[in-house]
């Protein structure tokens, strides 16, 4: 997990909770982002429990982007979108603005696209996987890398690679955050 202070907002970022979200200690924040893998292997009960927990957090704004373990959202988004509680924003190749901060959430598998559909300006880019060469153990997404180079967001928040959990890297004007919340050993 990471807490980012940006434009007078405290933004809590997390990912890869894999059904163990209730064990987290949640600090005070204005906005919370979960960058995917809320459950293990598409476990629908874990995902439903996650959304219940997430919706009840005492945080005003809640954003969720799916990871590859959140298979129900990846494979049947029309069904799961109906199950997501009010107050939780699910972003899949979509943009949202909260209090002057622009967030863009990518689909769980950006490597399946030739070009990512991203607007001209984004403060915080959210994806589940990292771009190639950034805290990625050499298995990040090359298309995402090129997109970030063109877009130049202020921040890129992602998870997926447990061995780089909570690591930060600044390259040029972009700060990259791996926000994996739980270590691999505990999964």
Image: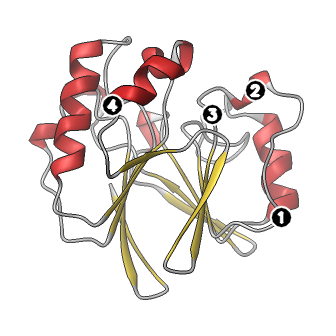
**What is the C-alpha distance between the residues marked 4 and 1?**
29 Å
Of helix, strand and loop, which one carries label 4?
Answer: loop
- Crowding around mark 1 (Cα neighbors within 10 Å: few <14, some 14 to 19, many 20+) is few
Q: Which residue is mark 1?
A: 120
Q: CA distance from mark 3 to mark 2?
A: 9 Å
Q: Are marks 4 and 1 in contact (CB under 8 Å)?
A: no
Place of residue 8 in the rendered image (x, y in percent of width and height, measured from the top left)? 41, 88
Label 3 sits on residue: 107
- In whole angstroms, how far apart are the C-alphas of marks 4 and 3? 15 Å
Query: Dot 3 surroundings within 10 Å: few (below 14), some, or many (20 or more)?
Result: many
Q: Residue at x 37, y 11 (%)?
A: 41
Q: Secondary structure at mark 3?
A: loop
Q: Which mark is residue 138?
A: none
Rendered image: mark on residue 111: 2
Q: Is 95 situated left or right of 165 in this image?
A: right
Is 31 left, or right, of 131 in this rendering?
A: left
């Amino acid at each position: 997990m990471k807490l980012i202070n940006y434009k007078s907002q405290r933004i809590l970022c997390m990912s890869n909770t894999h059904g163990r979200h209730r064990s987290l200690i949640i600090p005070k924040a204005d906005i919370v982002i979960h960058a995917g893998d809320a459950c293990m292997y598409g476990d629908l009960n874990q995902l439903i429990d996650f959304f219940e927990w997430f919706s009840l957090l005492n945080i005003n704004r809640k954003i969720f982007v799916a990871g590859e373990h959140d298979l129900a959202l990846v494979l049947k988004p029309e069904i799961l979108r109906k199950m997501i509680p009010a107050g939780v924003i699910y972003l899949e190749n979509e943009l949202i603005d909260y209090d002057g901060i622009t967030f863009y959430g990518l689909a769980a598998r950006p490597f399946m696209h030739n070009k990512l559909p991203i607007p001209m300006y984004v403060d915080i880019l959210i994806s589940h996987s990292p771009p190639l060469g950034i805290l990625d153990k050499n298995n990040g997404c090359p298309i995402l890398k090129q997109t970030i180079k063109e877009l130049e967001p202020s921040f890129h928040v992602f998870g997926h690679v447990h061995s780089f959990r909570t690591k930060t890297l600044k390259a040029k004007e972009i700060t990259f955050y791996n926000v994996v919340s739980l270590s691999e050993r505990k999964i």
